[in-house]
Image: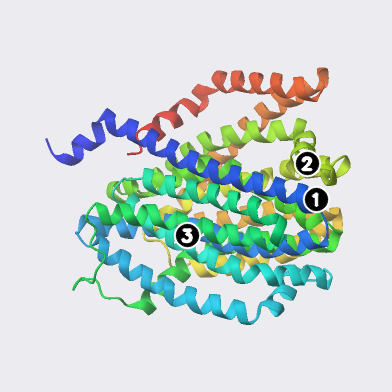
Amino acid sequence: MPADEQVKGSPARGRSALRSGALTGLSYLTLSLAAALAGAYLAHKFGRNLRTDGFMAAYGVYLVLVLGAQAFRMVVVPDLTRAEAEGRLGAEFRAYVIAFLAVAVPATVLTAVFAGFLGELVTGRLPQVSADVAADALPWLIPAAFLQLLASLAASALAARDSYLPAAAGFALGGIGGLVFFIVAADAHGLVSLAWGLTLNGAVAIVLPVAVLLFRGSRIRRHRDVPLRIGHRLWQLLYGAAVPLATQGLYVIALRFAAGTGAGNVTSLSYAYLLAAMFTSATAFSLSLISAAPLTRRGVDPESAADHVVHSAWVSLALVGAGAGLVALVGGRVVTAALGDAYAGDTGDELGRLVVYLSPWMVANAAFSIMYPLMFVMHRTRLLIPVAAAGVAVDIPISIAGRSLWGLTGVTVALGVATLVLVLALMASLSLRMLVLSVIGLARLTVLVGAATALAFGGASLVLSAIPAAAAGLALYALLLIVMRELGLAQAWHYVRALH
């Protein structure tokens, strides 16, 4: 029997897909929890003021680069999978590292030299004290982000070999190490110690996957069939990361508009965004990471691409619905307990509502995370940069209108609308048939999950107080999912199990 047939039919491979997804999801949950604990400690220690606004503005730049790096991990896996099949994985990895360093080193130097100017740029209308804090943090946050990019590249090389545990462990240990460093150093050094901790996080995340690559015999040296072509690889980095950076650029634009709605709102939107991103990273992003290599080997067409998006989104959004429902009922209380008195009362309730208002963004981000690797699996990358530029351009008038109509709420909703427009444009550039099939499938499951969430949590809130309603709503939501399993959820679960 041919080897490929054995792989497709092997139950062990199905269990491997679930195990790989669970390990990757747990890794990102650990990272998200570390980020949440760091945020909670920051809130208790430093409050909610102009200094925290300045740091969060700089942190937004870090998030753009890091989440772009994570998305680039999806981009590069198909190339490295093909390289592994041809026996040149180590040489390809080496060439990408050199290309990335050609950008990372100058960017780090320029950030250090022009830190003051960049601090004022990212803080916008905020006072000078905010700009000063941002200027102190940026020279550390930029290299920290590039370290995460290199760690993502090492994880991608391992993914090309269907190995996910070393990278998952590296990222998780990095998150924990950075958190511990911040807590230890915060008293003596203030907000900038979190930037130092994030730099440590990136350094730890690199060590384990690179060590495993070397231990398993990947010779990271020049290969006669793999020229460096630094310019070409930087171009690959640019167009591959263009859309992920654009999606995170929409977040930075949202922070910029939030700065004009009142002191502290940049911090509130930052925390709400981090919580919403945790819901999708633990599911949709993890599924995208473990699917890129097998889909590259298997090959996809527009119909199977649409099936992949809809099935994976089912699994992701089912969990997102539960998270959004819980936040809607007890988000304010949890925020106050976690972040301290500065977030008590209306401030905590508003932050909880912001997460709910980010529901359109969570749907769009889940679809993007699942669909984006298919652009590279199917070699449909010609329009990536125009779509990225158009997405950012469209977002500005949408954000202006949203802020004018509803203030911070409008800015939050505008972020979701702009992200959805960008995702639809990407689907259209991949295949019009895939766009139609995906939109129909995603609309159907969004209605189902949204109705289940509203019925379960909304219904419980009508007869119970917040905490009992959250528990009852979660139980009812799980029951509704079981009832609806024949409407697509069961099929989606079987599809995900067979990804490997």
Front one among 495 and 153 = 153
Which amino acid, by three-letter code, is at mark 1?
Thr
Residue at x 82% of width, y 62% of height: 50
Front one among 295 and 108 = 108
Q: Which label sits in the foreground, 2 or 3?
A: 3
Q: On the image, numbered disc 2 is attached to which residue?
A: 353
Q: On the image, numbered disc 3 is attached to which residue?
A: 203
Q: Which label sits in the foreground, 3 or 1?
A: 3
Residue 316 in the image: state x and y as whole percent.
53, 37
Label 3: which secondary element: helix
Q: Which label sits in the foreground, 1 or 2?
A: 2
Q: Does the residue at mark 3 contact the one at mark 1 (Cβ under 8 Å)?
A: no
Q: On the image, numbered disc 1 is attached to which residue?
A: 409
**Left or right for 473, reference 388:** right
Q: Does the residue at mark 1 contact the one at mark 2 (Cβ under 8 Å)?
A: yes
Between the C-alphas of marks 2 and 3, the distance is: 36 Å
Residue 318 in the image: state x and y as whole percent.
57, 32
Residue at x 19% of width, y 59% of height: 87
**Residue 305 visible in rendering:** no
Residue 488 in the image: state x and y as whole percent.
49, 29
* Rendered image quadrant of residue 245: bottom right
Which quadrant holds the C terminus? Answer: top left
Farthest-out residue, front = 188
Label 2: which secondary element: helix
Q: Is residue 36 above or below residue 337?
A: below
Residue at x 54% of width, y 76% of height: 107
